[in-house]
Image: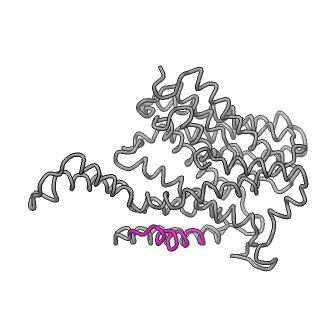
Amino acid sequence: LQQFSIPLIIGVIAGLVIANIDIHAYEDMVDFHIFGDNTKIFGKAVTVHFLVNEIFMVFFFGIATKEITESVLPGGALNPIPKAINPLLGTLGGILGPAGSFFLLAWIFYGGGSDLSTVANGWGIPTATDIALAWLVARVIFGASHPAVNFLLLLAVADDAIGLGIIAVFYPDPEHAVAPSWLLLVVAGMAAAYVMRRFHVSQWPVYILIAGGLSWVGLVKSSIEPALALVVIVPFLPGPQTTHETFEHAHHGASDATPTPVVPEETAHEALELHYQHAPLNHFEHQLKLPVDFGLFFFAFMNAGVAFASITQVTFIVLISLLVGKTVGITLFSWIGTQFGFPLPEGMGVKHLFVAAIVAGLGLTVALFVAGKAYEDPVFQDPAKMGAVLSASAAAVAFIFGRLLRVKDGED
């Protein structure tokens, strides 16, 4: 269930089914005030939708950040940093490509009409990539250890971080003006996490509750999407980079001044693995991954419930921008990067890049998230959400091209 993102998929299906059976009952569930109509947190009503989108998703993005943090540490797939330049160029293409496609298609379908400016406001929707599904699909298509998986993971998280930044700048909360001064609380959270790391605090909940709490409050009070709260905190958790020191210590002795017997290779690696398992960064993921994966059912259910009758030109604008705009943008920008001396990760070629770019068109989770911010009117919001749901078809397209181009580990 966890490995194949079944809760997320079931949530999408359940949301679609119930919304198409009784849309009013569905909306009542999504907007249900758990603690009463008058209960608010920093001016926001405590509905089921609020708890899922603005609190639960904090941990989803936190775990995604953990994966990126490990990949840029010594020994990671994107270390040293120059190795990350190409994926980041791909990320830029993954933003500009679909955004450009969206504007072009909006003009084609709505040019000259009064709805053009309203529709064009949704350009940020296809800039997102669903981290969970993209990672899953990439592992199936390329093989779990293929460098394209980490490449796509970095690209997806960077995509979504930029996407949430786009929300903050271009889709402000209509009920609360943006207040940048509150971002000082986010900085305070980062400082608190840094101090805790310097004092060797090893319990990850302390980082999340204190530093993460400050970051979350700062983002909420700034009227900036709080789902990013842990993105700037998780990298401070002590992680696997210390295992290299542990290995050297176990294998060669504590220091030249106090020599110790050399530990056999097998024992040294066992010590390395044991230390890795107890690293706070790793512990954070192990203890939260299961509830987060199953919690995605609720996110999908709360955000994917749209009626099939709502399919309009907006649906196809979103879908084409995700499938075509992202593929072209990522492939082109990363290829240009290789021409300027920023190579793809070792083991990746243009064919792997092309298939990975198709996978990045899976905009489901975060595209749904952004659609809810881009449009207030259901006349536009529901078709946009349907386009995000249908972007799941990118998995099938990528699988077909993956087989044709033989991109999986062990294939020519």
Of the pair 312 and 55, the residue shown nearer to us: 55
Q: Is residue 293 above or below residue 215?
A: above
Is 122 magenta? The answer is: no
Whether residue 203 is in magenta: the answer is yes
Horizontally, residue 397 falls left or right of residue 186, namely right
The residue at the point 45 percent across, 59 percent down is 235
Q: Residue at x 75, y 49 (%)?
A: 12
The secondary structure that most of the magenta stretch takes on is helix
Res 54 quadrant in image: bottom right
- Residue 322: image quadrant is top right
In the visual, does 183 lie left or right of 256?
right
Whole-percent x and y of residue 133? 62, 44
Name which quarter of the figure residue 91 lies in: top right
Which sits in the foreground, 274 or 388? 274
Residue 79's place in the image compared with 246, above or below, is above
Residue nearest the observer in this picture, 85 or 363:
363
The percent position of residue 183, horizontal first and vertical second, equals 57, 68
- Residue 300 drawn at (x, y percent): 72, 53
Residue extent of the magenta highlight: 202-218
